[in-house]
Amino acid sequence: MRSYARLAEFARSLTLVCMVLLLVTVIFDTLLMPSQGRAPNPTVWIALSLPLLILIPGLVRRNWKTFTWAGFVSMLYFAQAVVALFSPRIRALDMLQVLFSIALFIGALLFVRWRARAARSQSVQ
């Protein structure tokens, strides 16, 4: 039987890495390489980055409620990237955003699940 605490730490690491990578894709999409002839827009960057940036302190503190919210918030970025994939010009950046948002969702929810199991197994012993 695997240690759920180790699995939870792996899921936490996956979530944090995907959070940073999703932030990087938002930077590229809004400031460095905007799609469809748009101009770089710092206001849009702030609006898109703020939900992710708000969650980072709770993720670092290992707050399970924050991980749950991170799963919900990641679906907003997933939906945005899927809509962008239906445009006439498919970009690799949009595919990466879909991948990172899915990985963030899975990592966050696995952290909550494995952390609860680790706590339950410690209380039984």
Image (cartoon, grey):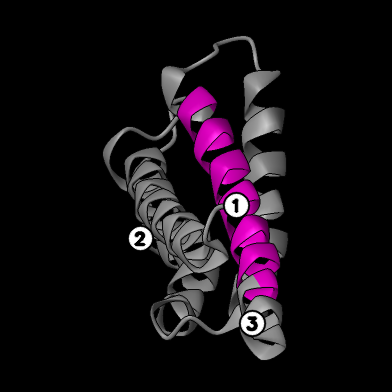
In the rendered view, does 78 fall on the left or right side of 48?
A: right
Q: Residue at x 63, y 64 (%)?
A: 114
Q: Is residue 83 above or below residue 51?
A: above
Q: Secondary structure at mark 1?
A: loop
- Residue 110 in magenta stretch: yes
55, 13: nearer the viewer: 13
State the image quarter where residue 99 is shown.
top right
Q: Residue 23, percent across and down?
A: 39, 54
Q: Position of residue 43 (x, y in %)?
A: 43, 64
Q: Is residue 97 left or right of residue 20?
A: right
Reply yes or no: does residue 50 show up in magenta: no
- Mark nearest the camera among 2 and 1 is 1
Please identify the residue farthest to the front as the structure is shown.
125
| Residues under numbered marks 2 and 1 in contact, where contact means CB atoms less than 8 Å apart | no
Which circle, 3 or 2, is nearer the viewer?
Answer: 3
Along the line of sight, the residue nearer the viewer: 100 or 64: 64
Q: Which residues are magenta?
A: 95-117
Q: Alpha carbon of mark 2 to alpha carbon of mark 1: how far?
A: 48 Å
The residue tagged 3 is 119
- What number is the disc on residue 42? 2
- Are there few (<14), some (14-19), or many (20+) residues within 10 Å of tag 2? few
| 1 vs 3, front mark | 1
Amino acid on which disc 2 is placed: Pro
Within 10 Å of the Cα at label 3, are there few (<14), some (14-19), or many (20+) other Cα atoms? few
Residue at x 69%, y 30% (from the top left corner): 82
Residue annotated with mark 1: 1
Q: Is residue 4 visible?
A: yes
Q: Give the structural element (helix, strand or loop) at label 3.
A: helix
Tell me which secondary structure the magenta stretch mostly adopts.
helix
Q: CA distance from mark 1 to mark 3?
A: 15 Å
